[in-house]
Image (cartoon, grey):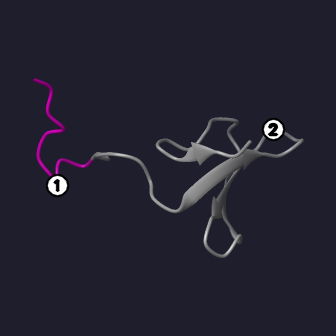
Amino acid sequence: MAKNGVSGDNRRHGAVKQRSQTQTPSGHWVKRDTTTGRFMDVKSDGKKFKGVRKEK
């Protein structure tokens, strides 16, 4: 049986709650707070945020 490991081992266990991400036309990924709708962070390297769900 697979396990998530122990907490405190410097990695995420499970998905990020109440966050979503979408891609801008320029190719950057933007993280958004789903409760308020405000943009939180932008990744400019073209890679997605890990563990954050994507918007349709």
Residue at x 14%, y 33% (from the top left corner): 3
Q: Position of residue 10 (x, y in %)?
A: 25, 49
Residues at marks 2 and 1, CA–CA distance in whole angstroms: 33 Å
- From the image, tell me which residue sits under label 1: 8
Q: Position of residue 13 (x, y in %)?
A: 28, 46
Main SS category, magenta section:
loop
In the rendered image, the quadrant that contains the N terminus is top left
Kindly give the residue lying farthest to the top in the view shown.
1
Residue type pointed to by label 2:
Gly
Residue at x 53%, y 47% (from the top left corner): 52
The residue stretch that appears in magenta: 1-10
Residue 17 in magenta stretch:
no
Secondary structure of residue under mark 2: loop
Q: Residues within 10 Å of mark 2 (few under 14, many from 20)?
A: few
Q: Is residue 36 above or below residue 52?
A: below
Residue 27 tag number: 2
Instruction: Name the foreground residue: 41 vs 20.
Output: 20
Q: Quadrant of residue 32?
A: bottom right
Q: Position of residue 44 (x, y in %)?
A: 71, 46
Kindly give the residue lying farthest to the bottom in the view shown.
36
Horizontal side of 24 relative to 46 (left or right) equals right
Q: Earlier in the sequence, mark 2 or mark 1?
A: 1
Residue at x 62%, y 65% (from the top left corner): 34
Residue type pointed to by label 1:
Gly
Residue 9 in magenta stretch:
yes
Horizontal side of 37 relative to 6 (left or right) equals right
Horizontal side of 1 relative to 13 (left or right) equals left
In the rendered image, the quadrant that contains the C terminus is top right
Instruction: Name the foreground residue: 39 vs 3.
Output: 3
Secondary structure of residue under mark 1: loop
